[in-house]
Amino acid sequence: MLGENRALYERYNLINNAPYNPTNLSERIQYVKTKPESVTSFELGYKTVVKGKLLFDVYGYVGTYQNFLSRRDGIQFASGVPSASGAFQGFSLVVNAPGKVKTYGWGASIDYLLPKGFTLGLNASSDVLNDVPAGFRAFFNAPKYRTNVSVGNTGFGKKKLVGFNLMWRWQESFFYESDFIQGQLPAYHTVDASVNFKAPKIKSVIKLGANNLLNSYYRTAIANPSIGGLYYVSFAYNVL
């Protein structure tokens, strides 16, 4: 992996012996000083409370990048000429993507106050990056769609001493990029849950909870370790 610094290109003789595009050996990737990336974006959002029980929040955005910073793979042959048997080195090079790269996204959430202190929440969001030229890596490692659904109560029962929260999370599969590995990252969904007990006499709260309650293993990046369930007990003093 190399940055754009010219001294590094000279150190590895990438100027006099420019690397080739591995998918098109007729193209050499010449050194070009990178320019600062810039983006022009517009965002619009709206938030409102309806009858004191429904909170609605929505936003959307669009953006256009100029001189988008990305990376390209290059292979440099020791002889300077592509050869099936010749020695070569691989490089990941920082470059500006030609043309304009566009992005857009949106998000929406609803939180509803139900009777007896119960709450229901739903949210969804999306982020998209378009027009990245073939052979240029953007590392835009984000799913197109994500959703969360939750239900909870901060205190119910005769004395409202018991509370809980239950949340379901899901995200879509997407193509993950890095300098060392790339591939399709599977979609996954998890369930988080917690129940808490208030102890007013000692001004404390005891909580039992789990992240990924069902212990469904998933990964957040290609080649990363899988993540399973996390179960915990907490005690908070002097919080009531």
Image (cartoon, rainbow, N blue to C red):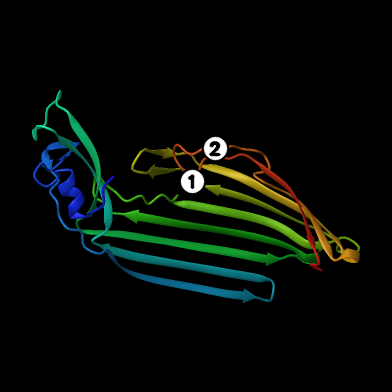
* Mark 2 vs 1, N-terminal side: 1
Kindly identify the amino acid type of the residue bearing the numbered disc 2.
Answer: Ser
Per the rendering, the mark at residue 172 is: 1
Q: On screen, 228 above or below 116?
A: above
Q: CA distance from mark 2 to mark 1?
A: 17 Å
Task: Give the number of the mark in front: 2 or 1.
Answer: 2
Residue at 58% x, 37% y is 217
Kindly identify the amino acid type of the residue bearing the numbered disc 1. Glu
| Most foreground residue, 205 or 116 | 205
Q: Residue 25 versus residue 158: which sits nearer the camera?
A: 25
* Residue 51 position in % (x across, y down): 68, 76
The disc label shown at residue 135, or none? none
> Residue 73 vs residue 83: left or right?
right
Would you place residue 83 above or below residue 204 in this image?
Answer: above
Q: Residues within 10 Å of mark 1 (few under 14, many from 20)?
A: some
Task: Say which residue label 2 marks.
Answer: 226
In front of the other: 27 or 87: 87
Q: Quadrant of the N terminus?
A: top left
Side of 204 where 134 appears, left or right: left
> Along the horizontal axis of the image, is 102 left or right of 11?
right
Residue 116, horizontal then vertical, whole percent: 81, 65
